[in-house]
Image (spheres, rainbow, N blue to C red):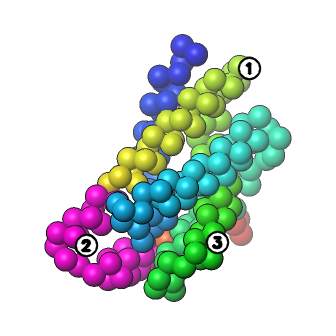
Amino acid sequence: MQDFPLYFQLGWQHILDWQGYDHILFIMVLCGTYTLTDWKKVLILVTAFTLGHSVTLALSVFEVITVNTPLIEFLIPVTIFITALSNIWSKRQKPKGQKFKYTMALFFGLIHGLGFSNYLKSLLGKSSSITAELFAFNIGLEFGQLLIVAATLILSFILIWMVKIKRWDWNFFLSSAIFGISLVMAAERFPALLG
């Protein structure tokens, strides 16, 4: 456990790294339709995503499953634009729609976990004892996600409650912008699938 602080730091730095902004965009669009008063729903949503990526991150690091890197790198922006599109289509959050969002976050977490695994595997190298490092990295990822969630919810609070932008307008703006960015990312990564 002496490496815990190191892998914890690597986890949160990895998810907050602007060069790998795809994970930042996903967390933003995942919780972008919510406000601070919805914190319980957001907590469940982020927990579902964390469960998903923790499972596949562990399975990949322990080499139970193998990762097709070009496919995963393509699927990550696909998860982002599907989530953004879902936000645009659902003008009002319905209870049934909420369960669907939790399931979607869990499933998309599985894909993102495979993306995280490439980075973590490169850090671990040939290390034989990786359980503690995996745990610390996962906790770091979760901490980084919570920072993104907090920043997104605070921004939505400022825009909706202080600047008086309509909630739907903010959702539409954020989701549309992220949809466009993720579509470009997917298009840029698609040729690697064919090569």
Where does label 1 land, which residue?
128
Which is more foreground, mark 3 or mark 1? 3
Q: Are marks 1 and 2 in contact (CB under 8 Å)?
A: no
Disc 3 residue crowd, few under 14, some 14–19, many 20+, Cα 10 Å = few
Dot label at residue 28: none
Dot label at residue 160: 2
Decide if residue 59 is on the left or right side of residue 103: right
Dot label at residue 100: 3
Task: Look at label 2 and name its amino acid.
Answer: Ile
Location of residue 191 (image quadrant): bottom right
Residue 72 visible in the displayed image: no
Q: Which one is earlier in the sequence, the residue at label 3 or at label 1? A: 3
- What is the CA distance from the residue labelled 1 to the residue labelled 2? 50 Å
In the rendered image, the quadrant that contains the N terminus is top right
The residue lying at 47 percent from left, 83 percent from top is 92
Figure check: 115 above or below 78 = above
The residue lying at 47 percent from left, 22 percent from top is 5
- What is the CA distance from the residue labelled 3 to the residue labelled 1? 39 Å
